[in-house]
Image (tube, helix red, strand yellow):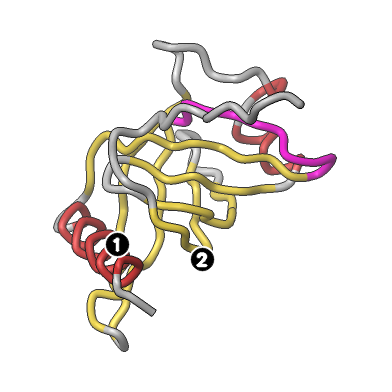
Amino acid sequence: MKAATMKPNLRNQQRVDIETDIVIEKPDGCQLICRMSNLSRTGVMVCCNQETAGQLIPRFKAPAPGNWISVKARFSVPVIAAQPVSVVVNGNIVHLRRMARDEFQLGIQFTDFEGNGFDYVDNYVRKLLAESRKPA
């Protein structure tokens, strides 16, 4: 029996699982809605269908180092339980993986946040990590 191999963590930050919508904007202004699957302080993994992946990544050619695909992302995080705030961040698509016939994962590495976006993400990730460590 072959031992399972560990996949390297491409981000140097801890990830938290999260399922919420994220809007990805291409440089030409085209906006596409995807689904966030995990978040860290330095990036996000999003899931999308084949059509959306094809619009974001021409010919489904995985981005090569130095040839990242620039995008802008918009999503909300709850700062206070009943008060979500909008985060706008520039980033690069640095990863593409086909998960199923019509399901793709895209890894986006953040480059710079607008306003207090980093603080909002940092606080939200910290809160979720602390909650996951509490005994049941």
For badge 1, the amino acid type reads Leu
Pair 1/2: label in front = 1
Q: Main secondary structure of the magenta part?
A: strand
Residue 108's place in the image compared with 87, above or below, is above
User: Is the N terminus in the top left, top right, bottom left or bottom right quadrant?
Assistant: top right
* Residue 100 drawn in magenta: yes
Give the secondary structure at mark 2.
Answer: strand
Give the secondary structure at mark 1.
Answer: helix
* Residue 77, horizontal then vertical, whole percent: 33, 68
Q: Nearer the viewer, residue 44 or 127?
A: 127
Tell me the CA gap for discs 1 and 2.
Answer: 17 Å
Q: Are dots 1 and 2 in contact, CB under 8 Å?
A: no
* Residue 61, horizontal then vertical, whole percent: 65, 18
Q: Which of 92 and 80 is in front in this view?
A: 80
Q: Mark 1 points at which residue?
A: 129
* Residue 97, horizontal then vertical, whole percent: 64, 31
Q: In which quarter of the image is residue 55?
A: top right
Q: Which mark is residue 20?
A: 2
Instruction: Write the residue at 30% across / 66% down.
Output: 133
Residue 1's place in the image compared with 13, above or below, is above
Looking at the rendering, the stretch of residues picked out in magenta corresponds to 93-102
